Amino acid sequence: MARPDLVAAGALVDMDAGSSGEAPFIEPRARLTPADEVERRIAAFQTVLEERALDGALILQNADLYYFSGTIQQSHLYVPAGGPPSLFTRKVVERARRESPLDDVVALPSTRDLPAAIVARHGRLPVQLGLELDVLPVRRVRRLQKLFPGAAFADIGPDVVRLRAVKSAWEIERIAVAAALADEVFHRASELLEEGMTEAAFAGRVESEARALGHEGVIRMRGFNQEMFYGQLLSGTSGTAATFLDTPLGGTGLSPAVAQGVSFRPIRRGDHVVFDFVAVREGYMADFTRILVLGRLRDELARAYGAALQVEEAVRAVARPGVTCGAVWAAAEAAAQTAGLSESFMGVGEGKVRFVGHGVGLELDELPVLAAGESRLEEGMVFALEPKFVLPGLGAIGVENTWRVTEDGIVPLTRASEEVVELPA
């Protein structure tokens, strides 16, 4: 299978700036979401609405809005339980019409006009209305309550998350493009690292390469206050600094205002670098970790890295459709225990997390979560598997790949060699 093109794969947007010389609304090499892809998603969502006896739902959050409409222009997407949806757009209408395959894209001068616009397009106001209550700000919900005083609101956020967990072939192609970007950036990383440079300086070089290859720069996460930059390139003991983020690796960051990620610590002879990197192309993400070292990796770290590879293989042996995430987590824990490193598996102390992987797609914290529980893997799911160990006084180490669930098991989308890259010191 050939690697996807890093800049744009497949059909391109034909978006001429025109004789006026005005800038195009859309990057000419960008790809639009196909109409049949959006139609399939809307139909699946409407089935959920019918099952929950909801008259319709409003979609506002960017990741969900893009998933169901193909645009993130400032809009309210109204999806009735039956019939075509309407995209009521306040800003920017013409761009939304070009980006979205939906037929009904309507200019909305003010949010106050939303109820009347729904009645005009759909004949009546919803009495049972779904909202993304898991992510919408309270102030926005209260405003909608005033606009729809006769409606009862229901949380459809978890339903949307479950629908998005199973990726279509088109989505998996997008994630594969992001995975190829991650592989290529790491391939170039060894040429960018120099002894004595700070973690921040190294990250800047890596980020420059990534942007030139088409990295979109925005890491979307659904969890409240979960935010991160796309590279956690932590050297030596930096990886042992625990922080608020739901990850086994934290880093100090450049100040308490961010409190995670790279620091101004110089990368010295003998230091290893945990190259933990999230690639984003066309909205979709791939998560990836490899190891670089200036010199030779210390024996204790090499042993832990070998254990991470063993955990990965243990998960690969059991993960397939129908298997519970709890069973996957148990296999990972057992492999870490066999290696004698269970205390440092997925962090230590307050920094320890109780999962070994997470879904990826339009957001970095999607389903499935490879943790204790009875939720099951399904064909078409995509997740990042990240067995990592944190060794106090030595640093953090591990591996991470993005995998898709197939009928027969899991296959990697990130495919760079897992060998530790030892650089001359």
Image: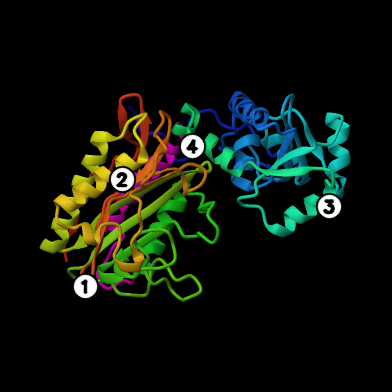
Distance from label 1 to label 3 (Cα)? 56 Å
- Reply yes or no: does residue 191 show up in magenta: yes
Q: Is residue 201 left or right of residue 96?
A: left
**Residue identifier under label 2:** 329
Q: Amino acid at mark 4?
A: Ala
Q: Residue at x 52, y 52 (%)?
A: 221
Q: Amino acid at mark 3?
A: Lys
Q: Are marks 4 and 1 in contact (CB under 8 Å)?
A: no
Q: Position of residue 150 (x, y in %)?
A: 84, 43
Instruction: Name the image quarter holding residue 89.
Output: top right
Circle 4: element type: helix
Q: Is residue 196 above or below residue 13?
A: below
Q: Is residue 1 left or right of residue 344?
A: right
**Marked residue nearer the N-terminal end (4 or 1):** 4
Colour approach in the figure: rainbow
Q: Position of residue 352 (x, y in %)?
A: 33, 62
Distance from label 4 to label 3 (Cα)? 33 Å
